[in-house]
Image: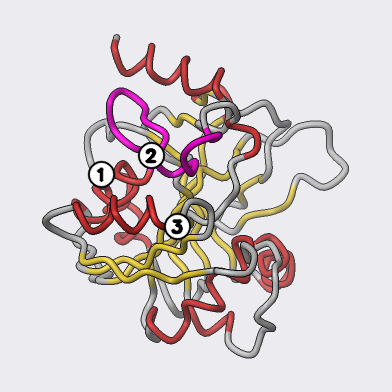
C-alpha cells in the first residue's frame, strides 16, 4: 500500500444549486449534521494519512480563509486562490500543480459525504493503486447505494477494474463518488483555463489508464438543499 501524503479538496464552485443556503456562504461551508462539507473532506484525508491538502477557493474567499485558518490538526492547508473566476475541476488542478508535487494525490469533491463502513474507503483505494497500470483511480458508488444522485450512472467496470463510459446506453451501474487518486503528470502542459476533469478522463479511458473501485459505504451527493436535508436525516438515524 502506497503512502499518499498530499491531497486536494475542490472547493471553488459557486454552489448555485445549493441556493438559498449559499446566499451568504460558499457551498464548502454549508453544514450537514453540524459539520461543514469541506471538513468532511479534509477529515477523511487526515484519517487516510494525508499530511497536507490544497484547497482551491473563489466564492466568499475571506470566509473560506478564516474557516481554514481556524482548523487544527492535519492536514496542513495550502490555499490556491482562483481570484478572477473559478477554474472548474480540471483548471483548478492545473493551477495547483506547483504545490501538488509529482507523486499520486487524492482529489475530492466537497459535496461527497459518506461514513466509512468497516475499512476506510480511501485506504482501500491506496491498497489497489498501481502506477504502472493507472493514471486515475475513481471511487465508484453503486446506484442503489446513493442519496442525492439523480443521474443514470457514469461507468461500467471491466473485469480488471478499468472503467468504461456509459455512452449511449440507458443506464450504468456506478456513479463517480467524488474522490480519486490522481497522477499529477497527466495535467502537465494543459492550459490554465476553466475545464472539467472529465475531459481528461475521456482521453485516458480508451488507453485503459482510468480504473475504478466500488465503495462499500453508502454515498451521499450533497448538491442541493433537498439532498442536504436527506443526508442530515440519514446521519441522524
Give residue 137's position: percent from left, percent from top.
Answer: 49, 61
Q: Name the residue under label 3.
A: 61
Do the CB atoms of the residues marked 3 and 1 lie less than 8 Å apart?
no
Q: Where is residue 56 in the image (x, y as percent from the top left)?
A: 46, 64
Q: Please tell me how crowded label 1 is: few (under 14), some (14-19), or many (20+) other residues with Cα within 10 Å.
A: some
Question: What is the count of numbered marks?
Answer: 3
Compared across the picture, whether 143 is left or right of 126 comes to: right
Name the foreground residue: 97 vs 60. 60
Residue occupying the point 45% across, 57% down: 61
Q: What's the magenta region?
A: 22-37
- For disc 2, the neighbor class at 10 Å (few under 14, some 14 to 19, many from 20) is many
Q: Check whether the beta carbons of the residues at disc 3 and disc 2 lie within 8 A of each other.
A: no
Mark 3 or mark 2, which has the lower sequence index?
Answer: 2
Name the one closer to the observer, 136 or 91: 91
Residue identifier under label 1: 120
In this rendering, would 113 be left or right of 191? Answer: left
Residue visible at 51% across and 55% down in the picture: 138
Q: How far is disc 3 from disc 1 in space, using C-alphas? A: 31 Å
Give the crowd class for mark 3: few <14, some 14-19, many >=20 residues within 10 Å: some
The residue where tag 2 is placed is: 37
- Where is residue 48? Give x, y as percent: 22, 55
Image spot of residue 129 (x, y percent): 39, 66
**Which numbered marker is on residue 201?**
none
Q: Is mark 3 on a helix, strand or loop?
A: helix
Is residue 177 located in the magenta-colored stretch of the structure?
no
| Of the image marks 1 and 2, the number of the one nearer the N terminus | 2
Residue 221 placement, left or right of 33: right
In the displayed structure, 179 sits above or below 136; it is above
Amino acid at each position: 500500500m502506497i503512502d499518499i501524503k498530499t491531497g486536494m479538496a475542490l472547493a471553488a464552485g459557486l454552489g448555485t444549486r445549493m441556493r438559498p443556503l449559499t446566499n451568504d456562504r460558499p457551498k464548502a461551508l454549508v453544514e450537514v449534521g453540524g459539520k461543514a462539507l469541506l471538513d468532511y473532506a479534509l477529515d477523511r484525508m487526515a484519517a487516510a494519512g494525508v499530511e497536507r491538502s490544497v484547497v482551491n477557493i473563489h466564492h466568499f474567499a475571506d470566509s473560506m480563509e478564516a474557516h481554514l485558518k481556524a482548523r487544527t490538526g492535519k492536514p496542513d492547508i495550502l490555499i490556491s486562490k482562483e481570484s478572477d473566476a473559478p477554474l472548474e475541476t480540471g483548471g483548478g488542478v492545473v493551477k495547483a500543480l506547483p504545490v501538488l508535487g509529482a507523486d499520486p494525490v487524492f482529489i475530492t469533491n466537497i459535496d461527497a459525504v459518506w461514513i466509512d463502513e468497516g475499512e476506510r474507503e480511501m485506504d482501500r483505494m491506496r491498497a489497489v493503486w498501481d502506477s504502472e497500470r493507472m493514471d486515475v483511480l475513481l471511487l465508484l458508488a453503486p446506484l442503489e447505494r446513493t442519496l442525492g444522485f439523480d443521474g443514470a450512472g457514469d461507468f461500467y467496470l471491466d473485469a480488471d477494474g478499468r472503467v468504461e463510459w456509459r455512452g449511449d446506453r440507458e443506464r450504468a451501474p456506478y456513479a463517480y463518488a467524488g474522490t480519486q487518486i490522481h497522477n499529477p503528470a497527466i495535467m502537465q502542459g494543459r492550459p490554465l483555463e476553466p475545464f472539467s476533469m472529465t475531459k481528461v478522463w475521456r482521453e485516458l479511458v480508451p488507453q485503459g489508464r482510468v480504473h475504478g473501485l466500488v465503495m462499500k459505504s453508502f454515498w451521499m451527493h450533497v448538491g442541493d438543499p433537498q439532498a442536504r436535508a436527506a443526508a442530515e436525516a440519514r446521519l441522524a438515524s
